[in-house]
Image (cartoon, rainbow, N blue to C red):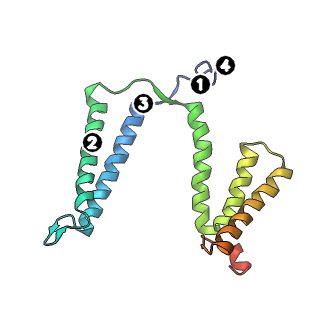
Amino acid sequence: MSDDGHHESGAHRGVSTKTMEIVVALLTLALGLVVIYDSRRVGAGWAEDGPQAGYFPFYIGIILCFASAWTLWQTLFSGKAAAGVFVSHKKLRLVLSVFVPAVIYVAATWFIGIYVASAAFIGVFMYWHGRFAWSRIVPVSLSVPVAMFLLFEVWFLVPLPKGPLEALIGY
């Protein structure tokens, strides 16, 4: 078995490069449309004193939309789309095992604060990915947020998102 997983069963199955090109083209097209819309909201024209705030972003949004549409057209209709597997199911599952908890961590920060969410995130990762013993997980997952709290809130006076637990201790 090699590190790249080509000799493992199912290594040639997964998300195709063509699919990923379509997804990325659609995402960048959507981003370009958002840039165009927001540029028009703040003013994308030319005022008496020069360009308005959205002038340059507006044209960058147009270029982004044209490039995305060109990529999408080439991928769908020209037959020049790259063939093959972009990522195998096994590697995609590994990436998602990191990405999904990170998204949950960011969302949890809004509801329970960054310190409690960080403690849970570190603990889950040490248990799930590192297979550490609880005797290591608990001290690390608790000491890192406490160190972050002392560093940001006490010493540098930089407030970070807090939840109900921090409110109980007076912060």
Instruction: Quickly name the residue at label 2.
Output: 67
The residue at 23%/64% (across/down) is 40
Q: Secondary structure at mark 2?
A: helix
Instruction: Quickly name the residue at label 4.
Output: 1
Task: List x then y, in percent, for residue 118.
Answer: 67, 60
State which tag comes first along the sequence, 4 or 2: 4
Inter-mark Cα distance, 4 to 3: 24 Å
Inter-mark Cα distance, 3 to 2: 18 Å
State which tag comes first along the sequence, 4 or 3: 4
Task: Give, as a three-letter code, the residue at label 1.
Answer: Asp
Instruction: Quickly name the residue at label 1.
Output: 4
- The quadrant of the image that shows the N terminus is top right
**Residue 163 visible at all:** no
Q: Secondary structure at mark 4?
A: loop
Residue 88 sits in quarter: top right
Task: Give, as a three-letter code, the residue at label 3.
Answer: Thr
Most extreme residue toward the right is: 135
Q: Secondary structure at mark 1?
A: loop
